[in-house]
Image: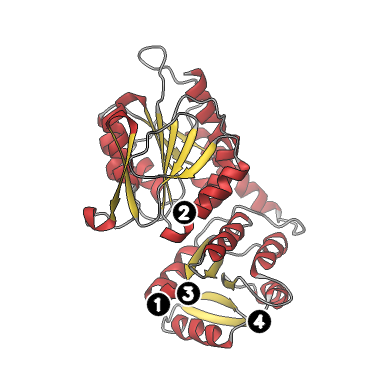
Amino acid sequence: MIKVLIVDDSSFMRVRIRTLLETSSEIKVVGIARDGMDALRKAIILKPDVITMDINMPDMSGIEAVELIMKQCPTPIIMVSSLTYSGAHETLEALEKGAVDYIHKDNLTEKNLIEKIFIAKDAKLTVTAENVQKPPGAVIQEAKEKILSDSLKTVQPVVFPSGHRTFSVIGIGISTGGPGALAKVLPQISPDIPASIVIAQHMPPSFTKPLAERLDRISRLSVKEAEAGEQLIPGRAYICPGGKHIMIEKKGIVSLYDKEKFAGHHYCPSASLLMSSISKVYEENALCIIMTGMGSDGLEGIIEAKKRGSYVIAQSESSSVIFGMPKAVISNNLQDEIVHLDDMADRINTLCLNG
């Protein structure tokens, strides 16, 4: 049974969310909170498995509540947000502070909400409580996981057949847990790398431009939302607009396509289409990275990329919020390396700057 705490200052939304959740026999609503402070108290007392959190509330906002809950009693939190520009910025801030996912009020259906709850329950939190003493057993288990993760990495320097290899483009496929992971990786990447970075992050149209703006402010390299027809420039990162598929054509030209153009791809943007396109154009000079996210998007594209000689990195299980997309690559033994999130930027810099 998944225990859920609902946090919202609107009685209408509290009733709506509760009604949707109680259609599942595997979910139990254990509490209701009307603001952030109330949420913090009940999270500590009730110990829910998942929390749904509104953003704008009196006394203490949802963003403030996320930060405090993650410090005092880390719990998977789903933000319930609006599709407005300001709503996108606030949701992204909450994700950076530790929330694992979000759902839009306009998209609040029984199927979508319950699916989000089940995903969040199994999410690996990227923050830990500052004032909660971990039992020795938990510390030992974490150490074992870290050792296992490290043992799966390629620890020896990679020696390419030619003795030197230059990467012209880096493709990143990412989903659940993506905004926080990108906020950790992109600021550490050197603006001097000779490669362009193209990112397929599963997000709605109103969210990708604010995401690019936030990442641009905290990164040394330039980050922008990709535009159709533009030429890729080394040392810049491009985020695919939500609701579009991104592909890189000859001479590094960005092409954007409506979701209907590739109806067979469930996720939009599709990481598989991105990986397939960059490997077709750049072959062994393409670096393909699959990071945290649910499902197996990216797998088909990585299969094609490997046939064309592209280099593949998968994020480690211990550092992924959801180990779905990287697992699909690793299970098929398609990766050249498995890299922890904390080491991802350094590995990109090393591969691109040192060859």
Which callout, 2 or 3, points to the residue nearer the camera?
A: 2
User: Mark 4 or mark 2: which comes first in sequence?
Assistant: 4
Label 2 SS: helix
Q: Amino acid at mark 3?
A: Lys
Label 4 SS: loop
Q: Is residue 10 left or right of residue 287?
A: right
Task: Write the residue at 54% across / 67% down.
Answer: 78
Residue 253, picture quadrant: top left
Cα distance, mark 4 to mark 2?
Answer: 30 Å
Cα distance, mark 1 to mark 4?
Answer: 21 Å
Q: Amino acid at mark 1?
A: Thr
User: Mark 2 or mark 1: which comes first in sequence?
Assistant: 1
Cα distance, mark 2 to mark 1?
Answer: 23 Å
Residue indicated by mark 4: 34
Cα distance, mark 3 to mark 1?
Answer: 9 Å
Name the outermost residue toward the right: 131
User: Mark 4 or mark 3: which comes first in sequence?
Assistant: 4
- Is 282 above or below relative to 110? above
Q: Amino acid at mark 4?
A: Arg
Of residue 177 and residue 24, the one placed in the foreground of this image is 177
Task: Write the residue at 31% across / 28% down.
Answer: 251
Q: Return the x and y of residue 344 as percentages of the image width and height.
A: 53, 36
Residue indicated by mark 1: 109
Mark drawn on residue 208: 2
Residue indicated by mark 3: 105
Which callout, 3 or 1, points to the residue nearer the camera?
A: 3
Q: Residues within 10 Å of mark 2 (few under 14, many from 20)?
A: many
Cα distance, mark 4 to mark 3?
Answer: 17 Å
- Is 146 above or below relative to 175? above
Q: Return the x and y of residue 27 as percentages of the image width and height.
A: 48, 78
- Is 182 above or below relative to 339? below
